[in-house]
Amino acid sequence: MRRPMVAGNWKMNGTRAEAGALTRAVAQGVDAAKQTEVLLCPPFILIPLVADLLQGGKIAWGGQDLNVHAAGAHTGEVSGPMLRDFGCRYVIVGHSERRALYGESDQLVALKFKAAQGAGLIPILCVGETLAEREANQTEKVVARQLDAVTNLVGIGALANSVLAYEPVWAIGTGKTATPQQAQDVHRFIRTKLAALDNGIAAGLRILYGGSVKGGNAAELFGQADIDGGLIGGASLNADEFLTICRAGG
Ligand code: 13P
């Protein structure tokens, strides 16, 4: 059985006061009896604050990105070992905003995946197509290319210790959610593709959906056979909304 997961990606949002209030409210509201794994990914600079508040509790925290190098002359960057040092368990790699706005190639994302595992972090690998790619019927081709870059570099075995997130770019922050069936179709495609390499790993791999998930649509999305939870942007900035989504995870 795959343990459901709901991860909040705060993106570049939050003052210390806002981050503190949000973290406290989520920690208080999360139901310890539920099996869903809950994760918060704040901006780097807020990680120490969030880590202090979540220390010893059941909610994990992680980074939104990392550099491929462990240390050195990379002004402005943050490494995997630094994230581990602050207790991060997970790190997002290949978010579509990193790919589109900061020019991250499939190859760089694969190197980040490898660097994350090398630092003892569990990578959450994001894949997904743009609207133009979907309209040109390129969804599976794009997602396959993004996955191949990683499996070619690290091998299918490395995916056993990772999480995937399907985030159609056209659904991110737009209020346009993929229908549960559209999302399920891509999740199924991903699992089937990876099953050709290793059936057991594909069966155990958690594949999250991200893109305008809200309290009102989470349960139906998470109810799909191959959707194991969500990667939540905007709605993770509101404690009540985020907690509703967490409860929909099961
Ligand atoms: P929204 O939930 O704001 O659409 O963002 C999704 C996302 O990019 C999470 O990583």
Image: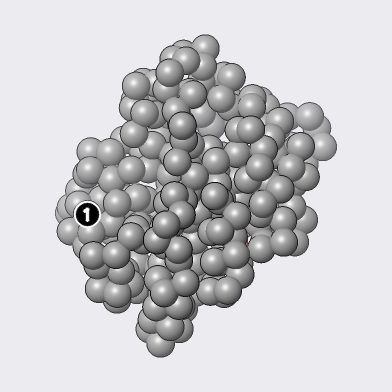
> Which residue shows up at 33% across the image and 72% down it?
50
Q: Residue furthest right?
A: 135
Would residue 107 be seen by someone viewing this image from the given angle? no
* Mark 1: secondary structure: helix
Q: Residue furthest bottom?
A: 17
Amino acid type assigned to the residue bearing label 1 in the image = Arg
Tell me which corner region of the image, top left, top right, bottom left or bottom right, holds residue 107.
Answer: top left
Tell me which corner region of the image, top left, top right, bottom left or bottom right, holds residue 234.
Answer: bottom right
Q: Does 122 appear above or below 18?
A: above
Q: Is residue 80 left or right of residue 196?
A: left
> Which residue shows up at 64% across the image and 25% down it?
189
Q: Is residue 116 left or right of residue 13?
A: left
Rendering coords of residue 33 (x, y %): 42, 57
Q: Determine which residue is flagged by label 1.
A: 84
Tell me which corner region of the image, top left, top right, bottom left or bottom right, holds residue 151.
Answer: top left
Q: Does 42 appear above or below 151?
A: below
Q: Residue furthest front?
A: 33
Q: Is residue 246 left or right of residue 182?
A: left
